[in-house]
Image (cartoon, helix red, strand yellow):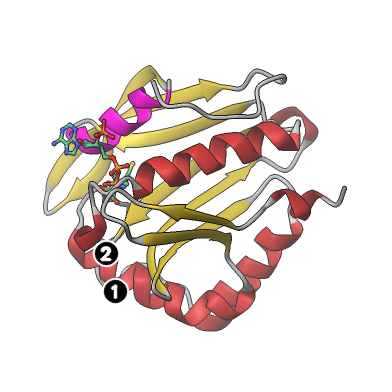
C-alpha cells in the first residue's frame, strides 16, 4: 500500500450533532490554513506564536503541504466543520533512520469549537495513523505547564509526563515552563482509545 493511502478521510458526528470531517491537508488549503493560523494566534497564548508572528507566505505554506503529503511519517490533519477549518494537528518525525520512529505534534482548535471533542478526535486519528505506519513508535509533545485542558487531553490518551523544561516560552517578559509528554506505540495496536 502507498504510505499516503494511510491518511484517510473520516466523517464524525460530534457531541452537539455537528458533522466533523478529518482529512489530510492539500496544497490548495495553504491560504485558508494561513488565515486559520492567524486566527488561533490571536485566540490562545498556548501556542508558539502570536498574531503576525507565524512568518510563512502562501507559497511557502503550499510547498510545506506538498512536502508533508509526500512524507510517510508526516501528517497535516485538518478538522473541518461546514467547510470551515475548525482545527489542525501537525506531526513530523526526524528524517534519519535513528530518529525517524519519533516525532512531535502540535494541535489547535478555534476557540468557538473548544470542548466539543474535536481535540480528542484529532488525537485518536494521529495515534491510529501513526500505529498503521509501523515506522512511528513514539509520539512526543511539549505543553505549557499551565495549559490544563491540553494536559488533561493528553493524559486521557495515555501520554506520560517525561520531564519539565524551564523557560520554554517567553511571553510579555514572562518565562513559562513546559512539560515534555510522550506516548510509546505498541506495534500491534492500531486503534486509539481514550482512558
Ligand atoms: C487544547 C485543545 C487542543 C483541546 O481541544 P478540544 O477540542 O477542546 O478538546 P476536547 O473537547 O476533545 O477535550 C477537552 C478536554 O479538556 C477538558 N478541559 C477543558 N478545560 C479544562 C481545564 N481547565 N482543566 C482540565 N480539563 C479541562 C474537557 O472537559 C475535555 O475533557 P473530556 O474529554 O474528558 O471531557 C484546544 O483547547 C486548543 O486548541 N487550545 C488552544 C491551543 C492549544 O492549547 N494547543 C495545545 C498546545 S500543547
Residue 43, quarter of picture? bottom left
Secondary structure found at label 2:
helix
Q: Which residue is mark 2?
A: 41
Q: Position of residue 30 (x, y in %)?
A: 52, 77
N-term-proximal mark, 1 vs 2: 2
In the rendered image, residue 15, in percent from the top left (x then y), is placed at 29, 48
Q: Is residue 9 above or below residue 144?
A: below
Question: Mark 1 packing: few (<14 Cα in 10 Å), some, or many (20+)?
Answer: few
Span highlighted in magenta in the image: 146-157
Q: Are marks 1 and 2 in contact (CB under 8 Å)?
A: yes
Residue shown at the point (36%, 18%) measured from the top left: 161
Q: Nearer the viewer, residue 55 or 77?
A: 77
Q: Is residue 1 above or below residue 70?
A: above
Numbered label attached to residue 67: none
Q: Residue 54, percent across and down? A: 38, 67
Seen as rendered, the residue at the extreme front is 17
Task: State the image quarter where residue 167 is shown.
Answer: top left
- Can you give x and y, in whole percent of width and height, for residue 122 in the image? 46, 46
Magenta portion: prevailing SS class: helix
Residue neighbourhood size for the residue with mark 2, other residues' Cα within 10 Å, grouped as few (<14), some (14–19), many (≥20)? many
Q: Gap between marks 1 and 2, in whole Å?
A: 8 Å
Kindly identify which residue carries mark 1: 52
Q: Is residue 144 magenta?
A: no
Q: Could you tell me if residue 115 is visible in this image?
A: yes
Q: Is residue 156 left or right of residue 102?
A: left
Which residue occupies the foreground of this view, 175 or 150? 150
The picture quadrant for ligand 1 comes to top left
Q: Is residue 100 visible?
A: no
Amino acid at each position: 500500500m502507498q504510505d499516503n493511502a494511510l491518511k484517510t478521510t473520516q466523517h464524525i458526528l460530534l457531541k452537539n450533532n455537528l458533522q466533523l470531517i478529518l482529512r489530510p491537508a492539500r496544497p490548495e488549503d495553504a491560504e485558508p490554513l494561513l488565515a486559520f493560523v492567524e486566527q488561533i494566534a490571536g485566540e490562545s497564548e498556548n501556542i508558539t506564536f502570536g498574531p503576525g508572528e507565524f512568518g510563512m507566505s502562501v507559497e511557502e505554506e503550499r510547498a510545506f503541504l506538498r512536502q508533508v503529503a509526500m512524507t510517510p511519517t508526516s501528517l497535516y490533519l485538518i478538522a473541518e466543520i461546514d467547510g470551515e477549518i475548525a482545527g489542525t494537528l501537525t506531526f513530523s518525525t526526524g528524517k534519519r533512520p535513528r530518529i525517524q520512529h519519533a516525532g512531535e505534534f502540535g494541535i489547535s482548535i478555534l476557540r468557538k469549537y473548544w470542548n466539543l471533542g474535536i481535540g480528542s478526535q484529532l488525537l485518536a486519528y494521529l495515534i491510529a495513523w501513526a500505529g498503521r505506519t509501523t515506522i512511528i513508535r513514539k509520539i512526543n509533545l511539549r505543553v505549557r505547564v499551565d495549559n490544563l485542558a491540553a494536559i488533561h487531553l493528553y493524559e486521557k490518551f495515555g501520554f506520560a509526563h517525561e520531564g519539565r523544561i524551564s523557560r520554554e516560552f517567553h511571553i510579555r517578559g514572562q518565562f513559562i515552563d513546559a512539560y515534555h509528554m510522550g506516548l510509546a506505540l505498541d506495534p500491534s495496536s492500531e486503534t486509539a482509545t481514550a482512558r
